Amino acid sequence: MIFRRRRGDSGQAFPIYITVAAGLLFLAFAYLAVGQAAVNRSGAQTAADAAALAAAQDRRDLLAGKWLTDLADPTAWDDILHGLTDVGSSCWRADELAAQNDAQVRQCDESPPLEVQVEVETNKRVGDSVVPGVSDIRSTRSATAVIEPVCDFDVPGEDAPDEGADAVVLPVLHCHDKIWKLDPKKPGDLPKPEDLFDVHLAD
């Protein structure tokens, strides 16, 4: 017995193959669009982290400088070490670091005395995509950097030893595991900004 192939089978299957191939191709482009968006978001987060840390480090340096200026007045130290003093804005450093990461700062908040909160937006768009409305999207991310004082001290009281009318009696600083016996006459031996404060991203 001879079986003859029906000519219509292959003709009917071909459009199905085309449809499946087109569907797979669309999915491939959709996954590519998702990947582009993920890369863009990652870049935005990197820019936000760098901007927040840079601004916080600058603010730390300003506070440390204010501490050095008021070194002879230990009663002012507590406010300085807890950020409760006016040292100006450090948001310009956030602008610089965001620009270096191809982004721009949308918001910079220094209202918490020892925090810098930054929100950035990427300059780069997601790009051409088969997903409608995605190509012109810019990613936005935020970060918060914390300035943490790490030193304790006791302000000398009335019972502090008298070392002469012109002598300045300074408290001993306990910073982490290090003890600083401060001598205003030896500025090179005084703590640096990184000795007085830790700067890190908020958890």
Image (cartoon, grey):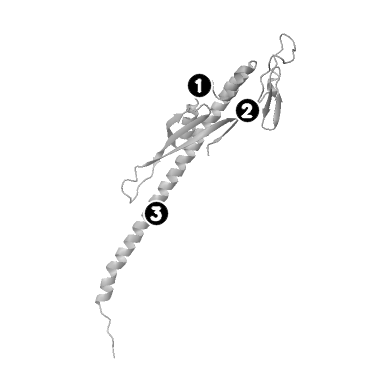
Q: Nearer the viewer, mark 3 or mark 2?
A: 2
Q: Which of the image's four quarters has the N terminus?
A: bottom left
Q: Which residue is mark 1?
A: 88
Q: Which mark is residue 108?
A: none
Report whether 135 appears left or right of 177.
Answer: left
Residue type at mark 3: give it: Tyr
Residue 171 can be seen, yes or no:
yes
Question: What distance separates the C-alpha of mark 2 from that of mark 1?
Answer: 19 Å
Task: Residue 115: give x, y in percent of width and height.
Answer: 51, 30
Q: Which residue is mark 2?
A: 196
Q: Is residue 143 above or below residue 85?
A: below
Q: What residue appears at the point 62 percent right and 20 percent down from the top-left corner? A: 68
Q: Is residue 8 above or below residue 200?
A: below
Q: Which mark is residue 31?
A: 3
Q: Earlier in the sequence, mark 3 or mark 2?
A: 3
The one of 55 and 83 positioned closer to us in this rendering: 83
SS for dot 3: helix
Which of the 4 quarters of the picture holds residue 189? top right
Q: Residue furthest top?
A: 165
Q: What residue appears at the point 62 percent right and 28 percent down from the top-left corner? A: 196
Task: Residue 45: give x, y in percent of width and height.
Answer: 47, 40
Question: What distance separates the C-alpha of mark 3 from that of mark 1?
Answer: 46 Å
